[in-house]
Structure formats: structure tokens, C-alpha cells
Amino acid sequence: MRALSLVILLAGYWALLSGQFHNSFLITCGVVCIAFVVWMASRMGLMDDEGVPARYYAGLLLYVPYIVWQVILANWDVLKRIWAADMPIDPRLVRFPYSTRAGFVTVTYANSITLTPGTVTMEVTETEMLVLALTKEGEDGLLEGDMERHCKRLEGG
């Protein structure tokens, strides 16, 4: 099942990037490369829940629009702060607990924080994250936990 989901994911990614649906040689090369990658991943023991987190794919379809919107909002906030001299920039380090259980979800959460401009995840331990926030509002948004709630939906929480 994991191999099949990896084949589908790689084929979709290849189709999205190449756009080559009319050239049989390139399609054959794509199929051969996908088969080789899946075979190598299997031989290397990478077909576990961490390497192919297939059970999270459906939830990611709902999470991706959320994180895209958060990136747009954060970009807008940073742009306003750059152009307006009266908007404060007050960098701060904040250490806060998180409650995600699955490694994939924790990494998604930490990367989502870094992906949104104005915040950077610097350290992740078993129970908490250390984040550099550009503003007090950014810190408050992290402590509010909206992004964590969206990430926890991936693991069914």
C-alpha cells in the first residue's frame, strides 16, 4: 500500500513538473525513474510511516489551503512593517509547549511556523519549540495555538 501511494505521489509530481503527456519516450523514462526510486526506497527501508506518510495525505488537502492563507497574511504583515516606519518590529525568542504526537505532524508544524514570514523555528525538543518571532503579535499568534490545532487535525486530534 505504501509503495502504491508513493508511486501515485511521484507520478503526480512528475506530471505536474514535466507536463509531458505527448512524448512516449519521456513518459517511459518517467515510469522507469519512478519504479527505480520506489525500488531503492524499499531496499533502503524507507517505506515506513516516516518515509511515506500516506495516512496524512488526505488531511494535507485541507491543511495546504490553510497554510497558504497564513503565508499570505504573514507576508502582508511583514510588508506593512517594512514600508511603515511607525509599525514596531520587536524580535523575541519564545519557548512554548506543543502537543502533537506524530513526528510527521510535529515537523509539519515546525516547518509551517518557519514558512510564515516573521517567525522561524530554531529548536524542537520532545515537549517544546523555540521560535524567533519578529513581533509581539507573532508571538501571541503562536501562543494562541491556531496553527497547532490545524496541524493536530492531521493526526486525528
Image: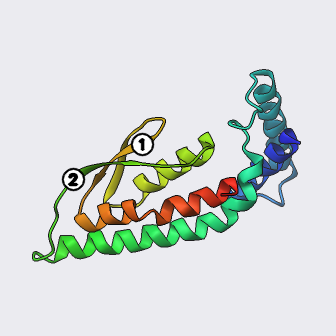
Foreground: disc 1 or disc 2: 1
Q: Residue furthest left?
A: 86
Residue 129, how many percent across, how many down? 40, 44
> Between residues 54 and 29, which one lies in front from this camera angle?
54
Image quarter in which the N terminus is found: top right
Residue 41, how many percent across, how many down? 76, 29
Q: Which mark is residue 142?
A: none
Q: Residue at x 15, y 77 (%)?
A: 84
Marks 1/2: CA distance?
16 Å
Q: Amino acid at mark 2?
A: Arg
Q: Residue at x 83, y 55 (%)?
A: 23
- Label whose residue precedes the other's in the sequence (1 or 2): 2
What residue does disc 2 label? 92
What residue does disc 1 label? 128
Residue 79, how many percent across, how many down? 27, 72
Image quarter in which the C terminus is found: bottom right
- In contact (CB < 8 Å): disc 1 and disc 2: no
Res 37 quadrant in image: top right
Q: Amino acid at mark 1?
A: Glu
> Between residues 69 and 99, which one lies in front from this camera angle?
99
Residue 99 lies, with reference to residue 62, above or below; the image says above
- The residue carrying pointer 2 sits among few (fewer than 14), some (14 to 19) or many (20 or more) residues within 10 Å by Cα, namely some
Residue 154 shows in the view:
yes
